[in-house]
Image (cartoon, rainbow, N blue to C red):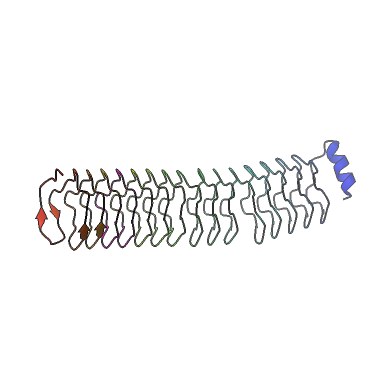
């Protein structure tokens, strides 16, 4: 179809352009709001800065198309082929991308807030700094995906595959990671306040400088995890596995570590002010200059631990197993 003919019919109110062959069409800056291009061929088309709000591009062939800075808010792109397409700076707010092909696509600066990416394969894709707030990433493949600095607060990641993903400095506040496999994932400096990580596998993950205030880490696997300088104030770590973890200079003020496993953990200079360590397992743990002020260590086990220069002001030591194996049953007053 001739481009001028297409635009003329669009101006006359025509919206049905299903199945048309528009390969290589020059449609940059064109307003095609609500147009129906279902099943159309738009391979290598120039759609940069085009307005395609609420457009239907379902099953559309957009291989190597230029959609840079295009506005596709609310567009239907289900099962579209965007292989090697340029989506730099594209606006895909609340767009439906379920089943879309994005292999080799450029997504720098794309806005995917509230978009539906359920089950989409994003493995290895560069999504640094991308806005994915409230996006649906349920079951998405994010293996080895670079999400450095990405905004994901409010996103749904249920069943997502995140092995090897890079989430350095990402915004993950309040996200539900329940039971997900995050082993070896780089979360250095990520904002995860209020996140649900109950039962999640974070073994050997990098959580240095991460913000986890009020996070739920009940029964989480945190074995050999890097927690230096992490903010875990008021976090729930009941019965979490922190064996061999490094919590140097971590802030666990008012955290609940009841029954937690901290065997062989490094807790040097960590802050456990008013934290609950009742029944915690601290065998062979290192506690050098650790702040235990007002912490509750009732029935905690510190057998074989290295405890030097502790702040014990107001610490509760009731039926605690000390490093030498003896049971200490009094409360320290200071």
323 lies above or below 198: below
Name the residue located 78 percent from the left edge and 42 percent from the top edge: 32
In the image, 224: left or right of 188? left
Number of numbered labels in the structure image = 0
Name the residue located 69 percent from the left edge and 59 percent from the top edge: 83
- Residue 264 colored magenta? yes
Q: What secondary structure prevails in the magenta region? A: loop
In the image, 332: left or right of 238? left
Magenta-tinted stretch = 241-270
Residue 29 or 314: which is nearer the viewer? Answer: 314
Q: Where is residue 212 in the image (x, y as percent from the top left)?
A: 40, 47
Quadrant of the image occupied by residue 44: bottom right
Residue 286 or 234: which is nearer the viewer? Answer: 286
Q: Where is residue 23 in the image (x, y as percent from the top left)?
A: 81, 56
Residue 82 or 293: which is nearer the viewer? Answer: 293
Quadrant of the image occupied by residue 200: bottom left
In the image, 97: left or right of 252? right
Residue 323 or 139: which is nearer the viewer? Answer: 323
Q: In which quarter of the image is the C terminus?
A: top left
């Amino acid at each position: 179809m001739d481009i001028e003919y297409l635009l003329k019919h669009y101006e006359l109110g025509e919206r049905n352009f299903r199945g048309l062959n528009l390969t290589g069409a020059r449609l940059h800056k064109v307003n095609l709001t609500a147009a129906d291009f279902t099943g159309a061929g738009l391979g290598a088309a120039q759609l940069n800065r085009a307005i395609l709000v609420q457009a239907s591009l379902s099953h559309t062939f957009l291989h190597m198309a230029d959609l840079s800075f295009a506005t596709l808010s609310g567009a239907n792109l289900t099962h579209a082929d965007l292989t090697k397409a340029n989506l730099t700076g594209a606006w895909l707010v609340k767009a439906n991308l379920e089943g879309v092909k994005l292999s080799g696509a450029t997504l720098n600066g794309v806005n995917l807030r509230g978009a539906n990416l359920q089950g989409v394969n994003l493995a290895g894709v560069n999504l640094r700094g991308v806005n994915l707030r409230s996006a649906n990433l349920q079951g998405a493949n994010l293996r080895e995906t670079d999400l450095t600095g990405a905004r994901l607060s409010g996103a749904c990641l249920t069943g997502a595959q995140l092995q090897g993903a890079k989430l350095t400095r990402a915004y993950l506040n309040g996200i539900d990671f329940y039971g997900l496999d995050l082993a070896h994932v780089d979360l250095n400096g990520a904002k995860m306040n209020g996140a649900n990580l109950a039962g999640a596998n974070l073994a050997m993950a990098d959580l240095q400088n991460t913000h986890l205030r009020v996070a739920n880490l009940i029964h989480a696997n945190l074995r050999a995890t890097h927690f230096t300088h992490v903010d875990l104030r008021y976090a729930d770590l009941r019965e979490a596995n922190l064996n061999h973890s490094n919590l140097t200079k971590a802030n666990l003020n008012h955290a609940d570590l009841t029954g937690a496993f901290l065997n062989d953990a490094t807790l040097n200079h960590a802050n456990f002010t008013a934290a609950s360590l009742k029944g915690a397992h601290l065998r062979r743990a290192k506690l050098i200059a650790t702040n235990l002020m007002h912490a509750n260590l009732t029935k905690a086990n510190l057998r074989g631990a290295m405890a030097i220069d502790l702040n014990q002001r107001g610490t509760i030591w009731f039926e605690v197993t000390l490093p030498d194996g003896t049971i200490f049953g009094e409360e320290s007053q200071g």
